[in-house]
Image (cartoon, rainbow, N blue to C red):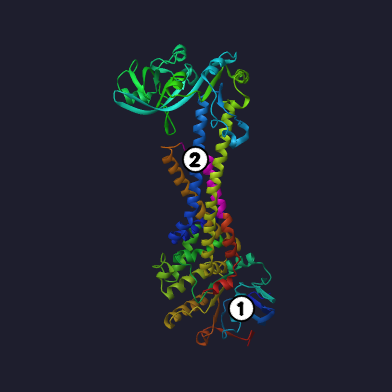
Amino acid sequence: MMGKLFETLRLALVTLKANKMRSSLTMLGVIIGVMSVILLVSIGSGLKTYITGQLEGLGSNLLMVMPGEFDVNSGSGAMQGAGMMASKLTVNQARELRQGSAIKAVMAYTENNATITYKGKSRITQAAGVSYEYPEIRNQYPVYGSFFTASQEAAAKKVVALGYTVADKLFGQEDPTGKKVTISDNKFTVIGVLEKKGALGGSDMDNQIFIPATTALSTFEMENVMAFWVQAKDKDQVELAKKQTEEILLKTLKDDEFSVVDTKSLLSMVTQILGTLTLALAGIAAISLIVGGIGIMNIMLVSVTERTKEIGLRKAIGATRKIIMTQFLIESIVLSAGGGIIGILLGTGFSMIINQFFPAAVTAWSVLLAFFVSVIIGITFGVLPAARAARLNPIQALRYE
Amino acid sequence: MKNNNLLHLEKVSKAYQVDSFAVKVLNHVSLEIKKNEFIAIVGPSGSGKSTLMNLMGLLDTPTSGKILLEGKDVSRLDESKLAEIRNRKIGFVFQTFNLIPRTSALANVELPLIYAGVPDEERKKRSLEMLIEMGLEKRVEHFPNQLSGGEQQRVAIARALINRPSLILADEPTGNLDSKTGAQILEIFHKLNKEGNTIVLITHDLEIAKTAKRIVKIYDGQIV
């Protein structure tokens, strides 16, 4: 049985090789389909890994306070309220939050694009207005100098801690601590340089500068910060910290003016949204696979008609329906599975190239799925032509011109 | 049962349904073919000789009557059973050679052995021997389109003989060849007959038919 199957496989390869141009054009449909599925799924899952990595880096005992209503469980529409609404969060509220018994640290957070200049060299960077707890909350400490203190923050001092890339580009070998720089027309004193965080995906995490949130508000003429990051004392107190945060904020804010989200539910929401997105993209790509399958069926039907006489002869000298059926079925499976394998290789190659600029990771399940789907397409769209060949009457087939 | 009886047709009729009419192509034909015979079946086109050949070659089953091959009733068997018997018992030679294109002479001869499930090595050996016997030792790896008509027909004969069939059915085997090559092919059939093979030659050419040991004439669906 195996020997016969191998024989049929060899025969299929010989036949397909005899029509190289036709075979490769037929495969192209499946190649493109499989390639797009692999590529889109790898971009989707790369993005997911990147974002979840970012969120997990925040630590599990972290809460975020955002302006507006924010419903984690309502799915894709959830982001609408948050961020869109003008923030009413203030630095004072952050200070009040520190009184919560389950709360270890609170960081007000705001950001703005800024130009930083030193001795004629300037660089566009992101200025983050943060609290003095930043190093502890983000687990990123200064390598040179120090971070700003609680009193420097309270006094809204014009001090800045530089991200590693910014320090490297502006100062090179020079020690930046104590140097004066200009940030958006204001003189600042560099107090330290933070350790490298590296590049995550395409964006350089070290192309940032950090100034006190209080200073950021006055420098950029803003009244409110964009968010608070609240750190609970430990994992078990996250719920309590969340409750306390809400209670304290309700003293000064209305219910719909803020939302407290823990990273876990944020994570599950992002995962869900990206999962749906990936699936939708893969679904669209899968349509081209079906089109590829129809192409295979078309060519197989032509091939059966062309080879009517050959089929008649094979039947006359002893080929049963089953043998003829298998022969044509294997031909179409070889076409589609061959296209599938080439598509997988191309898709993997392209996502490796894309990964240089944008997070993309080929997943094993998408490769396996793509391969099996292409085999199934070969069978599905090969059955009709193969059955037509198998049913041919040998007498009429032999007479066919 | 007579021991040297190879093929026995008993009151065989074949009718085809054309629209709502049943057209009788063969009408109560009875024929006996013994082992090692050389029979020519002659008749004009439309006489029913093709249908007779299809029935003798087990490519078709009769509407009524019985066909016995080596004493076994084969007139009511299903398609896959018939395919199996054709593979082992009957060798076909056609007017248009019917070799598979873009496939070497060797692979063409091998084909019936593949369907018979003969292992690769034995297949190659036997096919090669058969091609050598046909004088084609220099054409083994050639494709059909690289062979002359006579060479193609010799490949086809090698293919028909490869499974050592009980009966060789040749349908106008010289029809597409010039008279000289045709004579050579005919010579091969006579040689095969001398070696013990049973041969049924279907032709419309009386000159060719005369070289056979027995002539069966068919006209209007009946043996005359």
The spot of residue A179 in percent (x, y) is 33, 17
The spot of residue A103 in percent (x, y) is 57, 16
Vertical placement of residue B224 versus A112, above or below: below
Which residue is denoted by mark 1 in the rendering? B51
Residue type at mark 2? Ser
Q: Chain of mark 1?
A: B
Crowding at mark 1 (Cα within 10 Å: few <14, some 14-19, many 20+): many
Question: Same chain, marks 1 and 2?
Answer: no
Crowding at mark 2 (Cα within 10 Å: few <14, some 14-19, many 20+): many
Q: Quadrant of the N terminus of chain A?
A: bottom right
Q: Are marks 1 and 2 in contact (CB under 8 Å)?
A: no
Give the magenta-colored segment's residue range. A359-378
Which residue is denoted by mark 2 in the rendering? A42
Residue type at mark 1? Thr
Front disc: 1 or 2: 2
Vertical placement of residue B62 versus B208, above or below: above
SS at mark 1 in the image: helix
